[in-house]
Amino acid sequence: MDEFTWKRKVRIRERRRRQEKSYAFLLIFALIGAAMWYFLYYIHTPEYTIDRLSKALRMNDLKAIEEYVDLPKVLGDAYDELTADLFTYDSNITPSERALFENFYRLVRPQIVEGTTQVLRKKIETDEWIDPSGVELLKGRQLGIDFELMLERSLIRSTKFVKLGEISRDEDDNVSVMFEVLEQVTQTPFVFELALEKTDDGYWKITAIKNYRAYLDAISPKIGKDIADYIDATAVIVADYNYLFYDQQGEFIYLNRSSDGILSPSQKEQIAVYIEDHVIPNRVARQDELDAIPIPPGAMYFANLRKQSTELSIHAWRYYIRGLREESVGAFDTAASLQKRERVLDQRIEELARRSSFAKALPTIQ
């Protein structure tokens, strides 16, 4: 190889090394720039929050969801809208009674919001709806409120996430994001408008559902109408059996007559046989007739409550029979406990029936 050719190759290699160094420096600068843009700017934008939240929702990542959603605040605001909605169509409540109820719901707000937050967290973690633990006041009606029925009215359990949509800003620079959902009972699609606020540490977080009340107004009348229609369809069955149960109550009282309050062995057996041959079979027959009636989608919860009430009643009577025949205090106590649970369900059924009557005359909001 001559000297000229050798020097030419050396120059080419040196030029290539300089180019490679330049490309390496450009790549480093690009990576530094991208990192600076990401960590100094992008993670402090609403777009970053929505992107991360979308992934968290798909993966049921509770920790990430709570990082980007202020659950207690969102649920607290939703509770305020829900409890206001409870009285919207009830013309039987006077203004003073309305004010009293609204004050009561404000007093129990912390416990209800805490319980609902627990329920939602468990749903995200386990994909199951589990009653809250450690919030004893929410069990039964110790707060004077039916927490289970409130969850049902909130539509939280029937609302399915579809996708997060576009981010928008108004003239006052308020930021919102569209949140597409499906209400599964009525198969109604809806778009929530979620409000985002910037936190003190510079990140964005969802803090409210701006149109939750509109969601209730769109869905609740549909469910209420289905319940009202189902009540109408089963009215004759319910009325006939109520009349029969009233007669059986009189017969039961007659069989329990005693001058000293103590039942003889033959009386106990007579009562047990009467329950076995009449009381329980008639409750089974009533439920069979109810099961034969088509149930509109929005009335499925109502119909299931009726069925659960019937089953509890039958179980209670069976334990009562055991108490009579075995002279078992424990069996009588179990029967009383089951009857108490049945009364809670019956109160829930009555409340749903009462509110459904308001929905009959309401137009369906499309």
Image: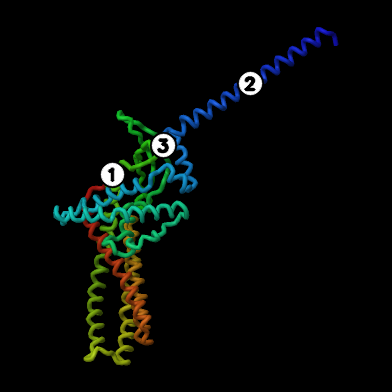
Q: Does residue 101 appear left or right of residue 170 in this picture?
A: left
Label annotation for residue 201: 3
x and y, in percent, of residue 134 in the image = 39, 61
User: Mark 1 and mark 2: span between their CA atoms?
Assistant: 56 Å
User: Mark 1 and mark 3: span between their CA atoms?
Assistant: 32 Å
Q: Which residue is found at the position 85% from the left and 11% from the top?
A: 1
Closest to the observer, 356 or 5: 5
User: Dot 2: within a 10 Å radius of its alpha carbon, few (fewer than 14), some, or many (20 or more) residues?
Assistant: few
Q: Which residue is found at the position 81% from the left and 7% from the top?
A: 4
User: Dot 1: within a 10 Å radius of its alpha carbon, few (fewer than 14), some, or many (20 or more) residues?
Assistant: few
Among the two numbered marks 3 and 2 on one chain, the one whose residue lies closer to the N terminus: 2
Residue at image mark 2: 23
Closer to the observer: label 3 or label 2? 3
Q: Quadrant of the C terminus?
A: top left
Closest to the observer, 22 or 170: 22
Residue at image mark 1: 214
Helix, strand or loop under label 1: helix
Closer to the observer: label 1 or label 2? 2
Helix, strand or loop under label 3: loop
Among the two numbered marks 1 and 3 on one chain, the one whose residue lies closer to the N terminus: 3
